[in-house]
Amino acid sequence: MDAPRTLAPERSAQSLPRMGGVLLKLWLCELWVLLPDSGVNMKLLPHEEEVHFINEYVNLHNELRGNVSPGGSNLRFMTWDVALSRTARAWGKKCLREHNPHLEELNMAHPKFNGIGENMWIGPENEFTASIAIRSWYEEKKRYHIENDSCSSDCSNYKQLVWNTSYKVGCAITKCARVENIRYAAVFICNYAPGGSLSRRPYTPGIVCSQCSRYDRCTDFLCSNADRDQAIYYRFWYPRWEVPRPIVCDPLCLFIFFLRTLCFSVCVITVLIIQSRFPNILLEKEMLFSPEVVEIEPEKVEEKEEGIKGEKMKKKEEDKGKEKEEVKEEEDREKEEEEEEEEEEGEEEEDEEGEG
């Protein structure tokens, strides 16, 4: 009878943590479902320098360019360019349905090329893929008539996509809260170099690779060249008009920082060496200058004392002289008074005798 009573509390104590863990998991699942931007609907847009993203849009560009209809005789093979992708990202951050006005300006859209081409796709963020955006540009070929080089409506994106002299491409996708009437929008931009003027046919129809340069070879039905297609990473270049501008330290900045650090280190080491070899340098200075002060000060004190004594003696002598003069004057006055009294007495006696 006692055994069940002792086991019951242990079983209930073990069941409480299990029940708490189950309730916590259920609460977390409900929270995950209720969050508006979580779960299946949450989507992270790729960075412009993410390798998978780059391979996706570069390969798709070359696939579409190599399969144009009618076939192209002088279309170039495309490779990735980091400066073009940074320009695309910088302009996409502005969340505008307008083309970049800096594409024709010198060194404002690329450190090497001028006259950059641009294609833009804007749509809901949850509907974006690089394939959807690029294929939508390619679909404009239905409006383009290559025989007479005319468009039934806008086909500029298609012409830039299959422009024969372009061989560098850089794209970027940017998230925007709103672009015109589209909320939670995505702005996908691709920049091309050299860009197309779009004032002629984008390519020359004919046998594939038949008009490639003698230094080129045919790769995926496109004209490729190892030197031309070499990837260059512009480490310290960013668009000047980008806001906010990334913090970049170029070689000159690094050199100045290293030089300042070196000078500071040399100064600190020099001070430490001097202090270690001459620890009592301040005391030595005091000892060198203190005897001179001791020798000079008594002389000045003696001179001052002698001067004071001399002045006192002079004053005493002057006072004595004045006292002597005053005594003489008093004596002279007393004599004169005595003489006057004697004269008066004599006159009085003479008068008395005359009367008798």
Image: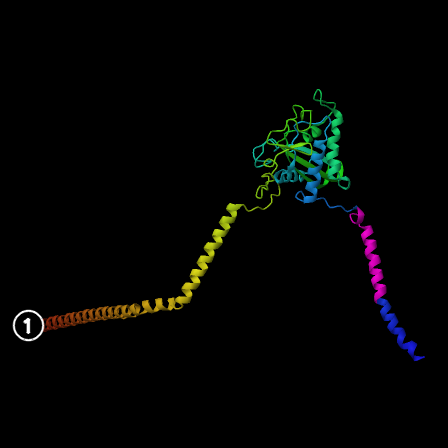
- Left or right: 211 as drawn, with respect to 11: left
Residue 226 percent coordinates (x, y): 60, 37
Q: Quadrant of residue 105?
A: top right
Residue 350 visible in the shown view: yes
Residue 95 visible in the shown view: no
Q: Residue at x 89, y 75 (%)?
A: 7
Q: Determine if the magenta segment contains residue 26.
A: yes
- Furthest toward the bottom, the residue is 2
Residue 167 percent coordinates (x, y): 63, 33
Indicate the quadrant containing the C terminus: top left, top right, bottom left or bottom right: bottom left
Q: State the residue in front, 306 or 161.
A: 161
- Furthest toward the top, the residue is 148
Q: Residues within 10 Å of mark 1 (few under 14, many from 20)?
A: few
Q: Which residues are magenta?
A: 17-40
Residue 64 percent coordinates (x, y): 72, 33
Q: Quadrant of residue 327?
A: bottom left
Residue 174 percent coordinates (x, y): 69, 41
Indicate the quadrant containing the N terminus: top left, top right, bottom left or bottom right: bottom right
Q: How is the image coloured?
A: rainbow
Q: Determine if the magenta segment contains residue 103.
A: no
What main secondary structure does the magenta stretch of the protein show? Answer: helix
Instruction: Name the residue tied to disc 1.
Output: 350
- Left or right: 141 as drawn, with respect to 213: right
Q: Residue at x 84, y 63 (%)?
A: 20
- Left or right: 143 as drawn, with respect to 243: right
The secondary element bearing badge 1 is classed as helix
Looking at the picture, which amino acid does disc 1 mark? Glu
- Left or right: 279 as drawn, with respect to 256: left
Q: State the residue in front, 344 or 130.
A: 130
